[in-house]
Amino acid sequence: MLTPFSQATPYTSQRSATYAKHGMVAASQPQASQVGRDILAQGGNAVDAAIATAAALTVVEPTGCGIGGDAFALVWIADDNAGNGELHGLNASGTAPAALTPQAVAEAGFESMPLYGWTPVTVPGIPAAWAELSQRFGKLDFQALLAPAIRLAREGFPVSPVIASLWQRAEETFRKHLTDTATSGWFETFAPTGHAPRAGEWHRCEEQAKTLEAIAASHSESFYRGELAERIDAFSRETGGYLRAEDLAGYQPEWVKPIAADYRGHKVWEIPPNGQGLVALMALRILEGFKIDSRDNPEVMHRQLEAMKLAFSDGQAYITQPEHMTHSVESLLGDAYTRERRALIGESALDPTPGTPQAGGTVYLATADSDGNMVSFIQSNYHGFGSGVVVPGTGIALQNRGHNFSLDPNHDNVLAPGKKTFHTIIPGFLTRDDGTPLGPFGVMGGFMQPQGHVQVVMNLIDFGLNPQAALDAPRWQWMGGKRIGIEHDYPAPLIRAMAERGHDMQIDHDPRGFGRGQMIIRDPDSGIYCGGTEPRTDASIAVL
């Protein structure tokens, strides 16, 4: 039963849930949360606050997102104070450049899609997402929304502890792998003093400030059809890249119909493929057929792990741009196929394979305003800082999202020019069965994301935890085959019980690999928001 106002704090974080009536912003950086809160105070709505917070995060958390990444959003727009309204989905993931073909990749000497350099770079969608959201649903001027991010980039900010550690880890990795002219600019932009900033050190980037100003003044046009596009095109041509001005000019984010799965009197909403939110929905559909009682019951955890593995094996086989999928969303979520997959779960750990249904580094933020509008927003470079390619003079770090493409011609997600790849970033949203909105949630972190969605949804609905406790709770993650990573906070007898069932349990004392989430749940009767924020990073909630 969902009980957002429960005061129970059973986990070691001991953070209190946060309550507010007139507005709330939950983000992974305190400075970004405050930016969103200030926008609400200026008369902006939840969409305005989400855009401003997202722009600020490209400055203060470049380890997970940047101007050259992708974004998705689920936006609840309320029609009245009773909570009636509509959920909208925005897919702002980019396509492979026209020149990026499997043959070109092979000629470059790669047998699979690499992680660094120009090859995995796809068209960025973040600037277009901000502009599209603002144009359709925003209240304030677009330039006003980006002004706080511009100020943070120009004047600087003290780097927070978790971000400093991730920044230093990225620098260590990049010094080993970034060795050509296309990627050398990363060090000038993100390690200008000769090393990644330490916790509490001041960091500024005038180049990024100027880029954000150009995006703000042109409503993102400069990035796709103006001076910034020309600079990206020129640098790509000079350094052996595939991205061209024509790829940028032809890009447009897509409004999509969100998909949902019923779960114990609620609907869990996700962005449809090419996003991997479908994986979370398939797992929840399987789990709904089992009796779920205690969170630390070995039988419950075993079924969670098995459902997640089965859903992921299907997702990795079939999810791509919808028109290229050999099996539809409807067939993968269908009753018959769900029963078939559920029946595979026995007493011992499976080594899962995809079924055959009948034919037929990231940041997450949540915002809410006094009118009942709510936004679930996520943006990402994909892998930390992305490809390592930084366009000179702009502060634009380009994503490496194309790494997820397959080069197998028989795979649904095979690389093709103009195609969108399987995408890891997924915003979530929760409603009651009757459509009453409850609120946005998300757990960032690569392939941990649908696993985090399943766990926090079950924490809320099955185990009666409030949003903060639902995020505080220790997590597990499937890592392939029978390998399960699990946080050390779990009871030792439960971990042993999983091992006895054949799961290869790997206890982890580093929480950074288990996702970082935010959540806001609205009480339909009082209109009061209850928020939770991630204890595994430098997150905070700001309220109005």
Image: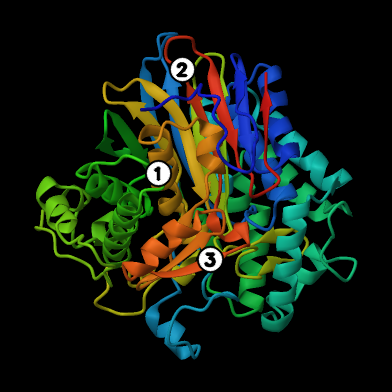
Precedes in sequence: disc 3 or disc 2: 3
What residue is shown with label 1?
295
- Residue 470: in sight, yes or no? yes
Q: Mark 1 and 2 residues: CB-CB less than 8 Å, in contact?
A: no
Q: Amino acid at mark 2?
A: Asp
How many C-alpha atoms fall within 10 Å of the one at disc 1: few (<14), some, or many (≥20)? some
Residue at (40%, 35%) from the top-left corner? 463
Residue 432: image quadrant is top left
Q: Position of residue 143 (x, y in %)?
A: 70, 32
Taking 221 as reference, is 270 left or right?
left
Q: Position of residue 195 (x, y in %)?
A: 85, 69
Give whichever of 321, 35 is nearer the camera.
Answer: 35
Q: Amino acid at mark 1?
A: Arg
Disc 1/disc 2 C-alpha distance (Å): 24 Å
Residue at (85%, 60%) from the top-left corner? 198
Residue at (42%, 34%) from the top-left corner? 460
Instruction: Give the vertical position of 354 relative to 206 (above or below).
Output: below
Residue at (88%, 44%) from the top-left corner? 155
User: Quick one: SS at disc 1?
Assistant: loop
Q: Amino acid at mark 3?
A: Ile
- Residue 129: in sight, yes or no? no
Disc 3/disc 2 C-alpha distance (Å): 37 Å
User: Quick one: SS at disc 2?
Assistant: loop
What residue is shown with label 2?
523
Precedes in sequence: disc 3 or disc 1: 1
Which dot, 3 or 2, sits closer to the camera?
A: 3
The outermost residue toward the front is 493
Instruction: Give the vertical position of 38 relative to 336 (above or below).
Output: above
How many C-alpha atoms fall within 10 Å of the one at disc 3: few (<14), some, or many (≥20)? some
Taking 101 as reference, is 467 left or right?
right
How many C-alpha atoms fall within 10 Å of the one at disc 2: few (<14), some, or many (≥20)? some
What residue is shown with label 3?
507
